[in-house]
Image (spheres, rainbow, N blue to C red):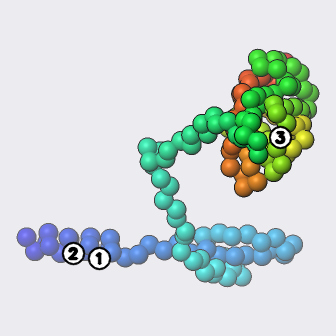
Amino acid sequence: MKAISVSVAILLMVASVTVRAEVYRQTDSQGNVTFTDTPGKGAEAVKIGPVTTIKMPKLRDIKAPSAPEPQPASDSTGTPYSKIRFTSPQDQQAFYSGNGNIELQVTSTPPLQDGDRFEVMLDGQPVGQGQGGTFAVRNVFRGTHKAQVNVVDQKGRPVATGESITFTVHRPSVLN
């Protein structure tokens, strides 16, 4: 019985010892710096601070962002935007773009009111805002994409949602 309690005590002492890895910095004759866990000739110990860890939320706790509900915006006379749409590319269009650069063109009826601007989203990510109606997007990957246009006010709040389109970009590949 005494041998078992001594063995348990020794195991507890060994388990309670903090394991600490040392890091050493060495510089060779050509001035190259290397870091290692083995001390060598001329090596100096490097003090390492505590490791920062971040606890990520579980996927089930993350809520997907919801798309803004289509809401007609009103100008100063009370006339809503009756239509917000893409003029280029067309819905379901497929086209070639060697470098992946594309141009999205949008329009509204009536024209944009003072302070309002278009916001164009590509695959759920904003790619541009402006009043001009033409948006150049660079290096779009090959494949099918969904574009959405909104009208936003001066504070960036969506005031109207336009039609979305789907289009396919063909690009050269080393495989074909």
Q: Residues within 10 Å of mark 1 (few under 14, many from 20)?
A: few
- In the displayed structure, 4 sits above or below 123; it is below
Name the element at disc 3: loop
Q: Which residue in the protein does label 1 denote?
A: 13
Q: Residue at x 29, y 76 (%)?
A: 13
Q: Quadrant of residue 150?
A: top right
Q: Which residue in the protein does label 2 denote?
A: 9
Q: Which residue in the protein does label 3 denote?
A: 112
Specify the amino acid type for callout 3: Leu
- Whichever of callouts 3 and 1 sits on the residue coming sooner in the sequence is 1
- In the displayed structure, 153 sits above or below 6; it is above
Q: Position of residue 119 (x, y in %)?
A: 77, 42
Name the element at disc 2: helix
Specify the amino acid type for callout 1: Met
Q: Residue at x 77, y 39 (%)?
A: 120
Q: Are marks 2 and 1 in contact (CB under 8 Å)?
A: yes
Name the element at disc 1: helix
Answer left or right for 57 relative to 40.
left
Q: Position of residue 70 (x, y in %)?
A: 63, 34
The numbered mark at residue 144 is none
